[in-house]
Image (tube, rainbow, N blue to C red):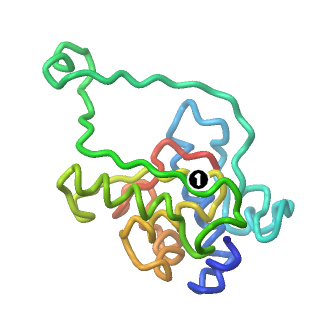
Amino acid sequence: PVLRFMKTYGITHEQLASVAVVQREWAAKNPRAMMKDPITVADVLNSRMIAYPFRLLQCCLVTDGGGALILTSADRAKDFPRKPVYIMGTGESVETPMVSQMETFNSSRAFKTAGPLAFREAGIAHKDVDHLMIYDAFAHLPLFGLGDLGFMPHEETGRFIADGNTRPGAKLPLNTNGGGL
């Protein structure tokens, strides 16, 4: 899918590499991140080829971990020591189990289905979003997400990230925990 996406929307290898660079900037701020050292676009493009066009630094590490999420009412959350995060809307969808079964190689049905559900349930628009978390097992997924979730046309996603719009302190912080890359 990534090659078709790049060809269709004019995404360059440098723009794809910039996704990993920005994720590392965020990871450097996370004491629990595994990979915190800064990297450059050149570092990414010079890292070992894994499966074209992905290089080592564009693929997430194999990691095991765990997490917990406590869901409670807004009234009960007031008793907790930390400021609560309110879930305003949700949307859920899955992609096909095999790449060969995808409807199109230019986007993800899961993003296109779940996004509108969550926005509608929350009663918000894209302009109301001040930070975004998009699954990033590989560097192309944030690009798919930005386009398929409706934040911008697909052809603008690579330049948007490469121009620094998702970095710390920028327009639309993306994967502020450092993501998986």
Amino acid on which disc 1 is placed = Asp
Residue under the point 63% across and 42% down: 36
Q: Depth check: give the residue in front, 154 or 116.
A: 116
Classed neighbour count for the residue bearing mark 1: other residues with Cα under 10 Å, few (<14), some (14–19), many (≥20):
many
Tell me the quadrant of the picture where the N terminus can be found. bottom right
Identify whether 121 is placed above or below 4: above
Q: Quadrant of residue 42?
A: bottom right
Write down the residue under mark 1: 136
Q: Residue furthest left?
A: 75
Report the number of discs.
1
Residue 177 lies left or right of residue 128; in this view the side is right
**Relative image position of residue 166 (x, y in whole percent):** 44, 61
Residue drawn at (69%, 48%) of the image: 60
Q: Is residue 135 left or right of residue 79?
A: right
Q: Nearer the viewer, residue 52 or 48?
A: 52
Percent coordinates x, y for residue 141 in the rendering: 57, 61
**x and y, in percent, of residue 121 in the image:** 23, 50
Q: Position of residue 74 (x, y in %)?
A: 17, 25
Camera-nearest residue between 132 and 121: 121
Instruction: State the residue at coordinates (20%, 23%).
Output: 73
| Vertical side of 63 occupied by 57: above or below | below
Q: Quadrant of residue 126?
A: bottom left
Q: Give left or right: position of 147 versus 99.
A: left
Q: Which SS class for mark 1?
A: loop
- Relative to residue 86, is residue 118 depicted above or below? below
